[in-house]
Amino acid sequence: MGIDLLRDLDAARRRRLLGHRRKIAIPTLAAVLIFAAASSLRAGRIDTIARTGPASRIAFVTTLLATLVLPVAAAVGIGVSLSLLLQLGQEAEDLTVMRAQLSDDDRFVEQPAPAKLASDEVTLLHVYGSLQFAGARTLQVRLPDPAGATRPVVILRLRGRSRLGTTSFIVLADYAEHVRAAGGHLFLSGVDPELAEQLIRTRRVDLEDAVTVLKASATVGESTRDAYAQAHAWLAAAWDDKQEPGRRFCFAWEGGWGSASGARCRARQAMVAASATAAAWPEPIAPSM
């Protein structure tokens, strides 16, 4: 019995010692964690986050508050997920569609894209921003609407994009069909060879009747200028000969039939589509120097 009593006393003493150790370890561990957290703070980075924009501030504050009330793993997961969502939203918001028009000095000048396509006119569009995920749907909303137009021709410049997602192909296919339904045509310029293979492989975009693809070359803008010339030739060929397609289109395109820009318009069309429009065109006027 005495031996059992001694064992009980020894066990009770051990429990008390372990209890004291646990009570001492918790504040110590807390102090270590606080010190580690304080050491990881970088005032310069926090200032940069605060000045960058609302998306960065929201992600930072949310993650910080989550670490105070949730386990660290859960808080980090919330912060990463929120950052990804904010990034996707920012990419979709930053996507911009600009229209480029050829000036009198043979350079492209950008301006905001129109809400609707004009009839019997070539519209060259530059797309800036990501076309992945939500960006593709944003592109769908910001492309000029072909409804109500007659024979609109659109050139969409895609230089620098090696691959597109499923949503992007769906958007391009739907837009091409809408342009085709209005009697027009869609040209894709600056297409990377890998993207061109992807277009053929997916079979989503009608590359036979609705869309013409021009691959990118080492010279920046070369395929876009080729697409511009082919678009003019396509539109000129679509005109009825009785309406003098070359005369009317050049007048609408670059400010006047008798102007120097109008003469260059006719000269470009003559070089690209002489066989298709020779019977309908008047005698060319030499461009002024």
Image (cartoon, grey):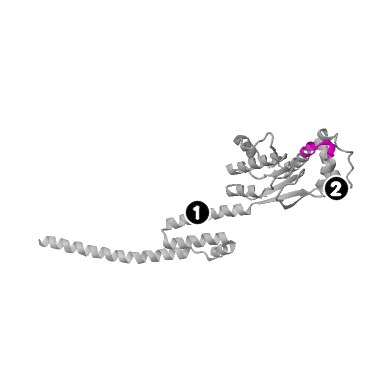
Q: Is residue 235 magenta?
A: yes
Q: Quadrant of residue 146?
A: top right
Q: Main secondary structure of the magenta part?
A: helix
Q: Amino acid at mark 2?
A: Gly
Residue furthest to the left: 1
Q: Amino acid at mark 1?
A: Ser
Q: Is residue 112 magenta?
A: no
Residue 212 horizontal side relative to residue 131, left or right:
right
Which quadrant of the figure contains the N terminus? bottom left
Residue at the spot 86% in from the left edge and 45% down from the top edge: 257
Between circles 2 and 1, the one closer to the viewer is: 2
> To which residue does mark 1 refer?
81
Residue at the spot 58% in from the left edge and 49% down from the top edge: 134
Label ID, residue 256: 2
Part of the protein shown in magenta: 234-244
- Nearest to the observer: residue 224 or residue 47: 224
Please provide percent x and percent y for residue 151. Answer: 74, 41
- Nearest to the observer: residue 140 or residue 194: 140
- Nearest to the observer: residue 274 or residue 43: 274
